[in-house]
Image (cartoon, rainbow, N blue to C red):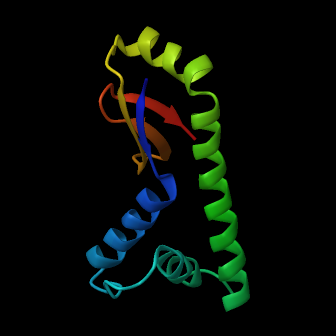
Amino acid sequence: MYQISIDLYKDWTNTVKEVFRGSGHPLPEELSDQEASSAYFRQTAQTDEEALLQQQSNEERLRGLQQTIVDNFEAVILPDIKARTGYQDNIFTFKWVYINGEHIVEEHSSYRIPL
């Protein structure tokens, strides 16, 4: 059996919180992921409603990507990881990262899925 850890939306919101900390305007620690996400989108949205729609759309997108990885893990992702990286263990940790664009990285094998 495979041990898979994945929470792409949490990874994204952790990055948002880090960006705010790095900007000198940290978000309150007690903010939920949705509140942090909304704060991020309010930076460019015309209205709070628009920010909320962007937040919801982004959460749905990331949760959809996560479900796609889980649903296709054994049939598609696992064989590709093994073929490309040679990784043979049963522990997989997928993370959302932003490095010259959005990617999903499997931390143990260094497998990368550009988005």
Residue at 47% in and 73% down:
33
Residue 109 visible here: yes
Q: Nearer the viewer, residue 30 or 105?
A: 30
* Quadrant of the snapshot with the C terminus: top right
Residue 107 percent across, percent down from the top left: 32, 35
* Quadrant of the snapshot with the N terminus: top left
Q: Is residue 103 above or below residue 10?
A: above
Q: Nearer the viewer, residue 9 or 114?
A: 9
Residue 66 percent across, percent down from the top left: 57, 45
Residue at 31% in and 83% down:
29
**Left or right side of 104 for 71:** right
Residue 106 percent across, percent down from the top left: 39, 34
Residue at 45% in and 18% down:
81
Q: Is residue 27 above or below residue 95?
A: below
**Left or right side of 31 for 60:** right
Q: Is residue 113 above or below residue 45?
A: above
Q: Quadrant of residue 32?
A: bottom left
Q: Is residue 12 above or below residue 81?
A: below
**Left or right side of 82 for 26:** left
Residue at 67% in and 59% down:
60
Residue 59 percent across, percent down from the top left: 61, 63
Residue 47 visible here: no
